[in-house]
Amino acid sequence: MRHNPSTVVVLAGKLPDQVLTAVGRSMNVVLVRPAADGDGVEVPAATLRRVTGISAPYVLVAADPLAAVAAGWSAMWDLSGDGRGGEEFELRAGEALAAWRAGQFELPDYYLVLADETGPAAADERRPDFYLGPLRSVRPHRVAVAAAASPAEQAAALLSELGSLRAGRWWPSLDDIMGTARGFYPGALTESPDAGRATLLT
């Protein structure tokens, strides 16, 4: 578990710059952006490490060490792709696990997903989502969703959601999270601890 004076929240996915700028103006929020571009785990992990010692009620991090894992997991369920999504997921999962085991990053307190105004359920149906699927299934209270349409509304929704974050059990190990992702069927709803879990062959 992390030891940090702030509540650290990773913003899942790529958010519009104007949304990040608006969120960063809040007096209770420090926004941390990556110092460089990169598709792997190194840059997001370094960005997440920079939050150590920041004193603010909330630190929002616009970089996620699991972003490539999330993209690979979604591609694994894309039937229109080249069929190699599973290989990409395993590659990215291996990279993330190696970095996590080496102490290069720890999971944040929360993940915050920006969905459109139709809400997370519709988003789940449109495209398999790692954050709203397997990640939320292991700790529902640690994956929050803010739904809005325009950039101004999106920024307000993100900030409003911060006040609704619930305390609860810390994340399981990243090994357990990856195991859940491997066996999570994206067409199922996470209404119970066992919902959504199935082998990829069934």
Image: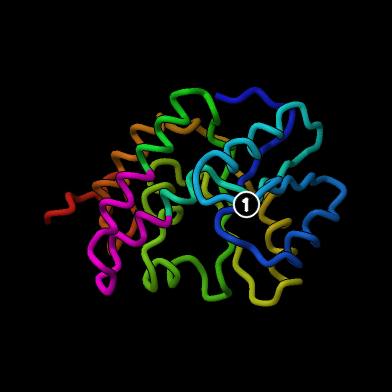
In this figure, which colouring scheme has been used for the structure? Answer: rainbow
Q: Quadrant of residue 106?
A: top right
Q: x, y (%) of residue 193?
A: 31, 44
Q: Which residues are magenta?
A: 71-92
Q: Residues within 10 Å of mark 1 (few under 14, many from 20)?
A: few
Q: x, y (%) of residue 137?
A: 38, 47
Secondary structure mostly seen in magenta is helix
**How many callouts does the rendering have?**
1
Nearest to the observer: residue 98 or residue 78: 98
Q: Residue at x 74, y 41 (%)?
A: 58
Q: x, y (%) of residue 199?
A: 17, 49
Element class at badge 1: loop
Nearest to the observer: residue 179 or residue 159: 179
The residue tagged 1 is 37
Left or right: residue 46 versus residue 26 is: left
Q: Residue at x 59, y 42 (%)?
A: 43
